[in-house]
Amino acid sequence: MLVMHRLTAVLLLLLVSVSVVQAQTPDWKAELGEDIVQIRGDKMMMEEYALLKLNVEGQKTNNLQVKLYAEAPKDGIISRDNFVNLTSMITYMSLLEIYARAYQLSASEYLQAVDIEQIPNPIGTPDIELNLTATNAGLQIEFVNTADNQRRRVTRTWEEMYAE
């Protein structure tokens, strides 16, 4: 049941985030036609940058630049569609959890406070890097705080991922 609540929150966050980004994009038709996943050699890859602005009442506006990098084998166990879906879900769940915990916000308060702007290239060094590596055996998620190079990794087999 907890997984369903998290998935619902993530899907809502994803829907709101995509709507916000598309509304801010002047050439939405061109954006809709672009591939999210690039194929290079034997790998599927995604690399995106975003500027998150968190406006919490009574606190200074906090801007955070995030880099997402994800890769998986092109002919591996995960399909291209599921690669995009899983990467999006993990990214938004992670950011929701980080910000909600840091600012003691509920999911709905976070959704109201955050403004996500997708940017084509980083503005200097991103504050947070989120690296996802999928293999036929499982998934590794790495969080990097670039200010102090603190890294945290979570590694799970596919069986463990779907058992939770």
Image: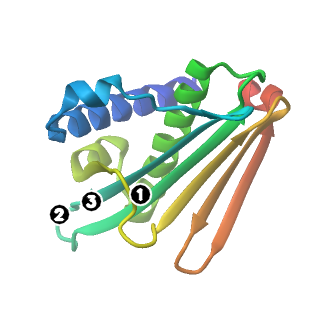
At mark 3, the secondary structure is: strand
Q: Nearer the viewer, residue 124 or 134?
A: 124
Residue indicated by mark 2: 57
Report the Cα–Cα distance between label 3 and label 2: 13 Å
At mark 2, the secondary structure is: loop
Which numbered circle lies on residue 65?
none
Residue drawn at 17 percent across, 70 percent down: 58
Q: Nearer the viewer, residue 136 or 164?
A: 136
- Mark 1 is surrounded, within 10 Å at the Cα level, by few (under 14), some (14 to 19) or many (20 or more) other residues, namely some
Closer to the N terminus: mark 2 or mark 1?
2
Taking the image as shown, residue 76 lies to the left or right of residue 40, namely right
Q: Residue 29, located in which quarter of the rendered image?
A: top left
How many numbered discs, if any? 3
Q: Are marks 3 and 2 in contact (CB under 8 Å)?
A: no
Q: Position of residue 18 (x, y in %)?
A: 30, 33
Q: Residue 73, located in which quarter of the rendered image?
A: top right
Q: Position of residue 76 (x, y in %)?
A: 78, 24
Three-letter code for the amino acid on which mark 3 is drawn: Lys
Three-letter code for the amino acid on which mark 1 is drawn: Tyr
Residue indicated by mark 3: 53
At mark 1, the secondary structure is: helix
Q: Position of residue 109 (x, y in %)?
A: 27, 47
Residue indicated by mark 1: 99
Three-letter code for the amino acid on which mark 2 is drawn: Glu
| Extreme-bottom residue of the structure | 148
